Amino acid sequence: MWTDDRERCAAAYVPETVGFATKPRLAEKMIDRVLPEFPELPENTWLAADEVYGRDGAFRSFAESRQLPYVVNVSSAQTVLPRPGWRRIDKLAAASACARSSRACGRGPGHSAAVRASTKSQS
């Protein structure tokens, strides 16, 4: 790791106390530094991040613990719901799309299941 090369760090004016940190950990530190300046976040404020942050469960938990609305990119193979029956994002998205439509959805020939969205209004 380049941060282990203290000569290189000194040449780049990196303090002795600074070590290696991943992008999500660096982002968390920056967000924590700026949040006190905004006791009330402006309306429609969102934290948006790419897949590097989206696949990092600790980063998503960080945003939730600070009550930051967020949207992150994740791989379609990303698993969610840390419990028995883990699901992949692509499967959840397909199931959600099926639930909102009245078309047949499934895993291909011989595996489809028709799902109808309820259009009845609650009175």
Image: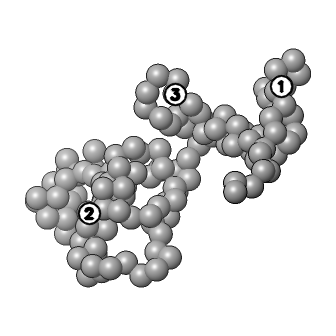
Count of numbered marks: 3
Disc 3 marks which residue?
86
The reply to whether callout 3 and callout 1 are in contact (CB within 8 Å) is no
Amino acid tagged 3: Trp
Secondary structure at numbered mark 3: loop
User: Does label 2 or label 3 sit earlier along the sequence?
Assistant: 2
Tell me what residue is drawn at x 46 percent, y 80 percent.
43
From the viewer's perspective, is residue 5 above or below residue 44?
Answer: above
Q: Position of residue 101 (x, y in %)?
A: 82, 45
Q: Within the image, what quadrant is residue 105 found in?
A: top right
Disc 1 marks which residue?
112
From the viewer's perspective, is residue 14 above or below residue 86?
Answer: below
User: Does label 1 or label 2 sit earlier along the sequence?
Assistant: 2
Disc 2 marks which residue?
29
Q: Nearer the viewer, mark 1 or mark 2?
A: 1
Q: Residue furthest front?
A: 123
Tell me what residue is drawn at x 27 percent, y 79 percent.
39
Amino acid tagged 2: Lys
Amino acid tagged 1: Ser
Residue 31 badge: none
What's the distance in space between the residues labelled 1 and 2, CA to CA?
A: 47 Å
